[in-house]
Image (tube, rainbow, N blue to C red):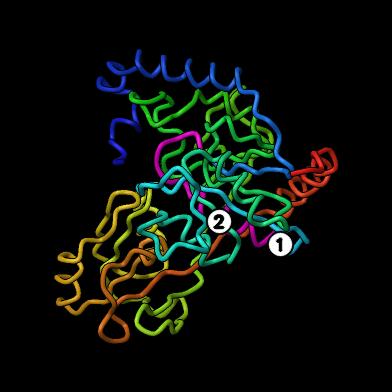
Amino acid sequence: MRYPAFWQRRGLTAWLLWPLGVLVCREADRRLRRARPRRLTCPVVVVGNLTVGGTGKTPVVIALVEALREAGWHPGVVSRGFGVKLGIEPLDLAEADGATVCGDEPWLIRQRTAAPVVVHPRRRQAAEQLLARYPEVDVIISDDGLQHHRLPRDVEWVIVDGQRGLGNGFCLPAGPLREHPHRLRSVDAVLVNGADAAKVLPEGDEVNPSTYRIDFTLEGFRDLYDDSECPPEALRGQRVTAIAGIGNPSRFFDMLEAGGVRLDAVPLDDHAAPEPDMVGRLLRKGRTIVITEKDAVKWPMPPERPGQVLVARGGIVLPRTLLDGAIAGLEVRRKNQPTTR
């Protein structure tokens, strides 16, 4: 969905919708208080957000999968599969043939990590399927799902967009929040993507003491024509067309411009696939097109020659203290898990 401008300020529209937002906040609190999920046979880490729209969860999930694997764990991932129609049974991405049937984010996670990924709107059902199919999995990472209380969790991370923060601080539809900001107090860590926490988080009791800044680092570009790689400075000084169908496209555009790239920006709705007609027109102009990895998994047509479409590649390095604390907690929690599946 689009992120309307009035979500960033407390103007007339926001105040008119504020009573509805209060009801949403109260209902979210009620569901949280009543949640009594049954434990699974391995610990669960939920990587979620308080706001509607992208905050950078997928790069965090990818980084966490890689870090846990390096620490000797065998992670698996569950995700909703936004924008696709699934049947009663969860979908194992080992049996999927592309992002159109499972969603762009889980498909990207599978491509980047090769970890087992199971998709279904009912994340507990997805988790049970994951454990049944992959008995070696000893920790589950949920891509989103902070408000999906049937899924038990041992660790909760909230990702906050460093540009938008918590918006105007109101709940839907008056603002971008799914829950009241005081929910930040109860999670294990708050990760602010691209800014210092003091600049975007509210002051007072809502601030979680375990707050970290994270940054997406551009590592280079992959040519969609032949998968060849080029360094991040390869486009410095050039004018390109940049397309981004992510939650906050301006974050992608700003990153390219910070690297000296001149661009014509084409923002798309989050999860939107580029239309073939639009792509055809842009390709005929002859200018290099730069896209995100999330857009690459649903790109509608292959390039005809090298240099036409480049995919920006990069990632997030998670703070060592954050990882050490999470892994230590998972070790303790794993010892207290049920032993049968």
The numbered mark at residue 234 is none
For marks 2 and 1 on the same chain, the one whose residue lies earlier in the sequence: 1
Q: Secondary structure at mark 2?
A: strand
Which residue position is annotated with label 2? 117
The x and y percentages for residue 32 are 58, 22
Q: Amino acid at mark 1?
A: Arg
* Residue 65 forms part of the magenta stretch: yes
Q: Residue at x 51, y 67 (%)?
A: 111
List x then y, in percent, for residue 174. 34, 23
Compared to residue 262, the image places residue 43 above or below, namely above
Which percent across, then down, holds residue 277?
A: 15, 66
Q: Nearer the viewer, residue 142 or 192?
A: 142
Determine whether 63 is above or below 125 in the image: below
Other-residue count near label 2 (Cα within 10 Å), few / some / many at <14 / 14–19 / ≥20:
many
Q: Nearer the viewer, mark 2 or mark 1?
A: 2
Q: Is residue 287 left or right of residue 27?
A: left
* Residue at (39, 58) in percent of width and height: 252
Q: Is residue 239 visible?
A: no
List the residue tagged with mark 1.
Answer: 69
* Side (left or right) of 47 relative to 338: left
Give the residues drawn in magenta, as a range. Answer: 49-69
Q: Is residue 120 magenta?
A: no
Nearer to us in this view, 150 or 223: 150
Q: How many marks?
A: 2
